[in-house]
Image (spheres, rainbow, N blue to C red):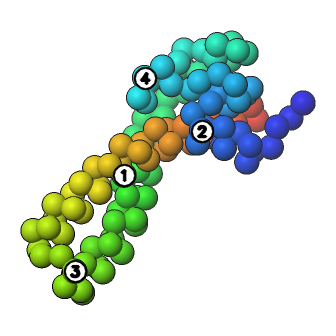
Amino acid sequence: MRVSNVIVVWRGILGRCPKCGKGRLFKRYIAPRDSCSFCSEKLGEFKADDGPAWLTILLTGHLIAPFLLYVSKSDALSEWDAIILSMILTIVLAFILLPISKGIFIAVLWLLSQKE
């Protein structure tokens, strides 16, 4: 049974096996498992390299920029408060988005391997 590409990418976003959707994709924060515990699909062979970091930086920048523009135009926060808050938000967003980005990349790489 063929699963749609959207479902496979959604499984990657959720950190699940792109094939079955039941097994966990990561054994630690962003370290992929060698294989799925449910369907035995080999997951360790998909090397996402710098793609997830690139996507995380892109998304984080686009999410933080409006906040910085708003804070710079309003007097809601002092300059130092805005700097500290934006640094904290950037770090938190990066830590949240990195495993999601890696899951997306592994799911897309898995999809591409299925088309060969």
Measured along the vertical axis of the image, is residue 34 above or below residue 65? above
Q: Which mark is residue 47?
A: none
* Gap in angstroms between the C-alphas marked 4 and 1: 18 Å
Q: Residue at x 27, y 73 (%)?
A: 68
* Numbered-mark total: 4
Chain-order first, disc 3 or disc 2: 2
* Gap in angstroms between the C-alphas marked 3 and 4: 39 Å
Residue 65: percent from the left, percent from the top? 33, 71
Say which of marks 3 and 4 sits in front: 3
Query: What element does badge 2 sit on?
Result: loop
Query: What element does badge 3 sit on?
Result: loop
Name the residue tied to disc 1.
93
Residue kind at label 1, given as amino acid type = Leu
Residue kind at label 4, given as amino acid type = Arg
Q: Which mark is residue 14?
A: 2
Residue kind at label 3, given as amino acid type = Ala
Q: Which mark is residue 76?
A: 3
Q: Quadrant of residue 79?
A: bottom left
* Gap in angstroms between the C-alphas marked 3 and 2: 36 Å
